[in-house]
Each structure stands twice: as structure tokens, then as C-alpha cells.
Amino acid sequence: MELFFLFLLIFLMAFALASGYPLAFALPGSAIISIMLAGFAGYIFEGNANEYFISDGPFQWINAGITNFRGVYWEVERDTLIAIPLFIFMGIMLEKSKIAEDLLISMGQLFGPMPGGLGISVIFVGALLAATTGIVGATVVAMGLISLPAMMKNNYNKSLASGIVCASGTLGQIIPPSIVLIILSDQLATASDAADNLRMMDYKNTTGSMNMPSQFSVESVSAGNMFLGAFLPGLVLVTLYMIYVLLIGVFKKELVPPVKYDGFYNIVFFKKVFLSLVPPLALIFIVLGSILLGVATVNQAGAIGAVGAGIMGGYRLYDGRKHKFTPAIISILSLIIIIILVRSFNLNIKTISNNQDLIAIIIAAVAAIFLIYGIAWSFYRTFKTNNVLKNVMMETSLTTSMVFIILIGAAMLTAAFRGFGGEEIVKDFLSSLPGGFWTQFIVVMAVIFILGFFLDFIEIAIVVVPIVAPIL
């Protein structure tokens, strides 16, 4: 009967999704209904509410789901998830302050005269926006609003233009810092602990000893390693997209016609391109570089990105006014001074050894005050100009809430799936496949591919990874 209620769980979830019920509530709702029905049926037909579960009973499995809820935001080891709202804020600020739009216009004017140049520019900006936002839906919507009218205006093929927007939007799945990679690293950390426990039990059953050698332990994967692993494939994918559009422009020019630029390629133009291109690229490389070089954690890098986006938004929204770059210059110079002092002197006030260190601490404190002043000034500008900061905070809150509600709902679904023996069924099925690891890997990838038609990456990461990762 456990198998019947497992199918009931899957059916209820599929029915809720097909009927348009919100995903965040369809996942836990189908889990709770299935668990309660199994408990009720067991009590009515067998006299025991625990009869149709592999172990324990309905209340224990609901409690397990609630424990998974708490694990999302209570466990100290899962602090990586804090980076999610920070990276979302960074991307939305760059979009709302029109920095992404400026970049698209500048790149379109620079590459527009070549066949497919505007499409290539859209892919480049989409990759940049994907690297900051990390959410596919947000990137596709932003790119659709920014780039689709421009391509339609310049007689681009409608289906190809839509495909360019969708393809560039999906880059948010792989280009770091991606929300997908952050959630995956969090889930893989949990899965690696489970796999380590399973391996320790096998070692105990084989040798009778609990002291398993360290070389047999399963190591976790940090978010930084995930970013490093995804960086090169992301660049390859962007390059392939650009090459495809370029080839279309060469062989079928009428689908992606060149866009003539009426201005002049002079110093003023290249200054505009520089100011549009370099700051967002520098911000992304600072964020990624600080993670990959071990200078900052993912959370700290997310905070750097959010503050940097606020500073950039402060000068962009003040375009055409006096002292446009003043807050940004104050912040950058103050930060440079602090970095130089940190590398050259001992700034630990408890271990001052000479007067030079004391003077360096005083200068660093003054520089820190100016840094805070420059950041506050920039954010004040975003607050006073068209309520940009308020809108960014609202969208960040909505997007972050959506992500975490789905995380919580998927955790309850995982508990129900395990309660009905789904995890053991999957384990036995994968273990029985001929060909070992690679056959199991191909089957899991095929299942994930099919699930991708119906579920978003968050549900797949939360539901599938904890089940199959310890087995693989």
C-alpha cells in the first residue's frame, strides 16, 4: 500500500500543478494530504495509522517535514542561502537603475552595423544580467522589456528575436554567481553528509569498526567550487550563442539585419561605452574573484555586489547633474586606502607595536567613515530618484520569498516521498541498473530533463538531489 500512496502523492502534485495551483503550496499541500490519507486509511482498515508507512506514522513524517522547514533557516551550517537575496538585489538594482539598458544601447551601437550585431549584444547583456540576477524568470522579463522592442524595431525575425531573449535569459542557470549553484551547493552539502553516514554504516558492517579512514569520507562541494566549475561552461555557452547568431547574420542576413549607427565613433562614443561596460563587468569580476580567490565567502561577496550595485545606481540615476560621480569616487578611494593600509600595517588595535600602526588605524577609521558616507549618499540618491530603492527592495523581497517558500514546500514533499518508501525504491532501481555509475548518471539526467518541463530548478534541486546524490 505504500506504493499506492506514493503514486497518490505524485498524482496530487501533478494535478495541482496542471490546474494552475501555486507551486509553493502544491508541493507541501499534496504531501500533507497524502500523509493524512495514508494515516486515516491505515487506522480504518488496519487499526493502525502507521501501517502504510515504511516506518513511524503520519504525525512523525509531518514533523519530519516541519523539521526540514526549520532546517532551511535555523541551521548555522546553511548560511549560504543568505547570499540569495543579496545577489537578487544586485541584479534588480542594475536593471532598475537602467545600467543594463545603457549597456545594451552602447553594445548595440558598437556591434549593430555587423550582421546579427544587435542580437550578439543582447546575448552579452543577457549574460551580464544573468550573472547578477541569477533568476531565469527575472532575466527573461528584464531582457524582454529592454531588448525585444529594439530588435522588433530593426526588423529582426520575431521567432529568432524571442529565441535570443529566452536563450540569454536561461544563462542565469549556469553563469555564476547563480542562485541555482547556491541552492545546489547547499543541497549537496546535506547529501554529502547523508552519503558519508551511509558509507560509515557500510564500513561498520564490513569491518565492525566505527573508525572509518578519512580517505573513504565523502567531501562536500562549496558554493565557491560550484562557481568555479560553472564559469567556463557558462562562457562556452555564451560564445556558442553568439557564434550561432553571427552565422545566421552571415548566411541569412534578412533575419538579423545590420543596424546602422548614425553617430560617430569618436572619443565621446568610446567614453560612453567604457562607462557603460566597465563598471558592471568590474563588479561581477570583483564578486566572483573574491569568492574564487578565497578572499570572501559567498555571503560576503553577495554583500559586496549589493553595495556595488547601489553605488552604480547612485551615479546612473544622477545622470546629467552636478557631482554625478562624487559618491562613487569617495567610496572607491576610501576602499583603496583601507586595502593599502590593511596590507601594509597591523590594524589590530589589541596588538599595536609602534606609532606607525596607530596612525594607520586612525587613517583607516577616517577612510571607513568616508566609505560609509559615500555608500549612504549613493543609496540616498536611489531612494529619492523615482523610488528606485523602494521598488528594488520590493522586487527583491518578492523574488526571495518565492524562492524560500518553494524551498520549504519542497522539503515537506521530500519527507512524504521518503515516508512512503520512495527513496528506497529509487535506490534499489538505480542499484539494479547494469553499467554502474554512468548508467545511473544517464538515467538521473534523463529524469531531471523530463522534470524540467514541469518543475523549476529549485524544486528539482530540493526534491531530486537529496534522494539521488547519496546513491551516486
Image (spheres, grey):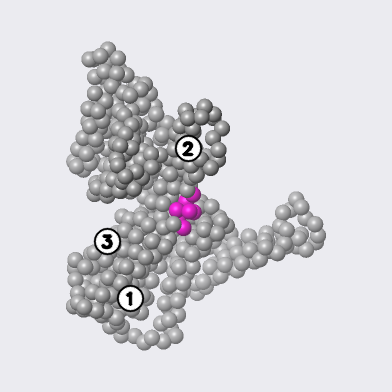
| Amino acid type for the residue under numbered disc 2 | Asp
Q: CA distance from mark 3 to mark 1?
A: 18 Å
Residue range in magenta is 222-228
In this picture, is 153 found above or below 354? below
Marks 3/1 in contact by CB < 8 Å: the verdict is no
| Amino acid type for the residue under numbered disc 1 | Gly
**In magenta stretch: residue 207:** no
Q: Choose mark 3 or mark 1, whichever is in front.
A: 3
The quadrant in which the N terminus is found is top left
Disc assigned to residue 108: 1
* Element at label 2: helix
From the image, tell me which residue sits under label 2. Answer: 196
* Residue sticking out furthest to the right: 354
Instruction: Say whether disc 1 or disc 2 marks the residue closer to the N-terminus.
Output: 1
Residue 213 left/right relative to 155: right
- Residue 140, quarter of the rendered image: bottom left
Residue 75 left/right relative to 51: right
* Element at label 3: helix
* Residue sticking out furthest to the top: 47
Name the residue: 34% across, 43% down: 436
The quadrant in which the C terminus is found is top left
From the image, tell me which residue sits under label 3. Answer: 166
Identify which residue, 431 or 395, lies in the foreground. 431
Identify which residue, 444 or 238, lies in the foreground. 444
- Residue 65, quarter of the rendered image: top left
| Amino acid type for the residue under numbered disc 3 | Cys
Mark 1 Cα shell of 10 Å, populated few (<14), some (14-19), many (≥20): many
Name the residue: 21% across, 78% down: 251
- Residue 234, quarter of the rendered image: bottom left
Q: Position of residue 29 (x, y in %)?
A: 28, 33
* Element at label 1: helix
